[in-house]
Image (cartoon, rainbow, N blue to C red):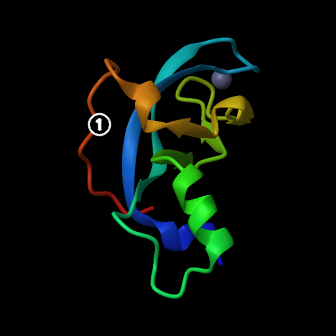
């Protein structure tokens, strides 16, 4: 069973600050994430091993954007990949979500 069945997914945008590797300027960017909130119960049809997995998974955010366009020089650069997944419990005390409904 796909792990995604364990979660409700909701897209959101979060602010982040990155330094462009080309021009070295630091700017604030709005990065797209998918918020995956664990459902109250395993999905119908979950096998025993799916239930074990369900017990282990936690609410988290998965980053959708892999790169950003530098606001200073206009070049695209890659977002450091070590923060592509964030557990919601790590977000305590961080800035609130940016509530923007934007497509593309
Ligand atoms: Zn730049």
Q: Quadrant of residue 23?
A: top right
Of the pair 99 and 28, the residue shown nearer to us: 99
Query: Does 5 appear above or below 60?
Result: below
Whether residue 64 is visible? no
Of the pair 40 and 82, the residue shown nearer to us: 40
Residue 98 percent location from the top left of the image: 28, 38
Q: Tell me if mark 1 has few (under 14), some (14-19) or many (20+) residues whose alpha carbon lies within 10 angstroms of its own.
A: few
Residue, x 42% and y 31% (percent of image)?
A: 89
Q: Secondary structure at mark 1?
A: loop
Looking at the image, residue 85 sits to the left or right of residue 39; the answer is right
Residue 24 percent location from the top left of the image: 68, 11
Taking the view exactly as shown, the residue that stands out farthest to the front is 48
Residue, x 56% and y 23% (percent of image)?
A: 72
Q: Quadrant of residue 18?
A: top right
Residue, x 59% and y 30% (percent of image)?
A: 70
Taking the view exactly as shown, the residue that stands out farthest to the right is 22
Task: Residue under label 1, please give it.
Answer: 97
Looking at the image, residue 38 sits to the left or right of residue 87; the answer is left
Considering the image in quadrants, where does the C terminus appear? bottom left
Query: Does 75 appear above or below 13?
Result: above
């Amino acid at each position: 069973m796909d792990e995604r069945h364990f979660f409700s997914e909701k897209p959101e945008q979060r602010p982040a600050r990155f330094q462009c590797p080309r021009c070295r300027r630091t700017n604030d960017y709005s990065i797209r994430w998918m918020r995956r909130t664990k459902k109250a119960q395993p999905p119908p049809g979950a096998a025993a091993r799916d239930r074990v997995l369900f017990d282990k998974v936690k609410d988290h955010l998965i980053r959708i954007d892999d790169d950003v366009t530098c606001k200073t020089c206009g070049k695209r650069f890659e977002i450091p990949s070590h923060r592509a997944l964030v557990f919601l419990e790590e977000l305590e005390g961080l800035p609130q979500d940016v509530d923007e409904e934007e497509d593309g």
